[in-house]
Amino acid sequence: MQHKDKILLVDDNPTNVAILEEVLGEKYHLKTAGSGEETLALVEEFRPDLILLDIMMPGIDGYETCRRIRANPSLKYVKIIMVSAKAMVSERIEGYQSGADDYITKPFDEEELMAKVNVHLRLKSVEEVDQLKSNLLMLLSHETRTPLNGILQPLEILMSDDALDPEMRKMCLDSMSRSAERLRLLLEKVIKLCALKAGKWDFKFENVDLCDVVKKAAAEVAALASERNVKIEQELREAVTKVDAKEMKFLVSALLDNAIRFSSPGGRVVVGVSAKNRHFNLTVNDQGDGIDPGLLGRVFEEFDDPDVKHHTDGNRLSLAIACQVALAHEGTINVESRKGSGTTFTVQLPLMDR
C-alpha cells in the first residue's frame, strides 16, 4: 500500500467538493467537511497534512476556523490553503492573518491547485522533520550519556585490571551489554520516527489476523508484566485485514508496554480486538492513575515538554511511532483517560479488501 498524504476538503457546496475529489482523489487520502464546526470536530481525529478551506460557509466562516486550528499546538504543521471566489487583496490578507499558508480563487485552475498542494505538502514534511531532527539531536546528547557511561566505565575497569576476578568481569560485561542494547534501541527509534514522519518507511502489507499480532505482542511484554505483577487479559475476535504485521506488532507492544508501566502491582491490562462497520477496533485498557488532563492532547507527541533535556527513555518515542504506524494504515489512534480511573487507547483500522 502506497503512503498517501491526507487532505481535508472543507466546503458547503457539494459540487465544489465533488470537483476537488475528482482532481485529488486518486493521489491523496481525502475526507470532507461542510462547515467550520464539522471541520473542528474532525481535524484532530483525521489529522490531515493539508486543508483546503472554503471561506464563506454558514456558521463559523473559514477565517475563524483557520484561527481556531492555528490555536491548537498539536496541529501546528498542518498546511491550510484558503479557497474562495473572493479575489480582493484585502481578503487574501485577512486569510494570511488568520493563519492560512496560501490562497487560491474559484474557479481554480487544476494545474495551479495541484502545484500549490504539492508544494505545501513538501514544505510541511520538511518543516516537521527538521524540527524533529533538532529535538532528537538534543535528546540524544542527553539520553546517550547514561548508556555510554554504562559502557565506558566498565570498559575502563576491564582494561585497567588484568587480574579482575571472574564475577567482577561478568558484572562489567553485563553492564556493557545492557547499556549497548539500550543505546541501540534508542537510535533505532530515532531513525524510525524520522523515516515515518518523512513518509519514507517501507511498509509491507499482507492479510493478517490482528488477534495473532496481539498474541505475539503480549508474549513480547510478558516478562515485563510478570516483573511488575500485572496481568494481561485478551478479549479477541477474528479480525483479518491488510496490515504490516511487524509494524502492527510494534504498535500493540508499545501500547501494552505503556499500560504495564503505568499499572499498579496486582493490576490488569486488557487488550481487545473487535469489528464494527467495516472497521476493527484494537483497545488497550489499564487501571493506572490515569493521565493528567493537561497532557492528554500531547500523548502521541515525541516531546510533551519544551525542555527535552529532562526527558527519559526517549520520551514517548514508542507512542509517537505507534501513532505514525496507525496513520500509515489509514487508521486513527486515540486515548481516553480520567485521573485515578485508568487509561484506554483505541486504534481504529479500516477493513482493507483481501
Image (cartoon, grey):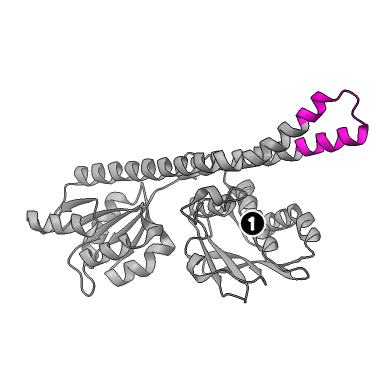
Report the side of 243 relative to 55 (left or right). Answer: right
Query: Which residue sits at x=25%, y=59%?
Result: 53
Residue 2: percent from the left, percent from the top?
46, 43
Element type at marker 1? helix
Residue 236 seen anywhere in this rendered image of the structure: no
Q: Which residues are magenta?
A: 155-177
Report the side of 7 relative to 250 (left or right). Answer: left
Q: Which amino acid lies under the numbered mark 1 shown in the image of this protein? A: Val
Residue 289: percent from the left, percent from the top?
64, 72
Residue 173: percent from the left, percent from the top?
81, 34
The answer to which of 148 and 325 lies nearer the viewer is 148
The answer to which of 312 and 105 lies nearer the viewer is 312
Report the side of 134 relative to 206 (left or right). Answer: left
User: Which secondary structure type mostly characterizes the magenta part of the structure?
Assistant: helix
Residue hosting label 1: 252
- Above or below residue 203? Residue 282 is below
- Above or below residue 89? Residue 2 is above
Query: Which residue sits at x=32%, y=63%?
Result: 71
Q: Quadrant of residue 34?
A: bottom left
